[in-house]
Image (cartoon, rainbow, N blue to C red):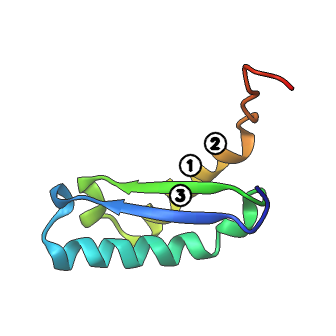
């Protein structure tokens, strides 16, 4: 499946109340926007915020995303067990 890389976000109740969760989601979305172009076309990532994200700085969130995206870029594609 080709197309631009996409990202989805999961920010559970353990992160905080609705105001905190929405703030974390907005900050993650902003940090992700500039980094998505570094991923291969057709990549879909799901970013799950842990409770510590509520008190993390934007720089800390960005560094965590950089680390995760490095892992995504270096991962080898899974080959299907069935061929043909």
Q: Are marks 1 and 2 in contact (CB under 8 Å)?
A: yes
Q: Is residue 60 left or right of residue 55?
A: right
**Image quadrant in which the C terminus is located:** top right
Instruction: Decide: few, some or many residues near mark 3? Use Cα within 10 Å; few <14, some 14-19, many ≥20.
Output: some
Where 74 sits versus 37, above or below? above
**Which residue is pictured at 68% across the width and 55% down the height?**
43
* Farthest top residue in view: 81
> In this view of the protein, which residue sits in the foreground, 54 or 21?
21
The residue lying furthest to the left in this view is 17
Number of the label disc, if any, that sits on residue 68: 1
The residue lying furthest to the right in this view is: 84
Mark 1 Cα within 10 Å, few/some/many (few <14, many 20+)? few
**Helix, strand or loop at disc 1?**
helix
Name the residue located 46 percent from the left edge and 68 percent from the top edge: 59
Q: Which secondary structure lies at badge 2? A: helix
- Residue 54 image position (x, y, % from top left): 25, 65
**Residue wearing tag 3:** 65
- The reply to whether callout 1 and callout 3 are in contact (CB within 8 Å) is yes
């Amino acid at each position: 499946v080709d197309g631009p890389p996409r990202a989805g976000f999961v920010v559970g109740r353990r992160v905080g109340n609705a105001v905190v969760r929405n703030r974390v989601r907005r900050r993650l979305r902003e940090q992700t926007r500039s980094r998505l172009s570094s991923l291969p076309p057709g990549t879909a990532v799901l970013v799950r915020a842990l409770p510590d994200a509520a008190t993390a700085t934007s720089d800390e969130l960005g560094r965590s995303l950089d680390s995760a995206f490095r892992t995504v870029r270096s991962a080898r594609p899974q080959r299907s067990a069935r061929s043909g």
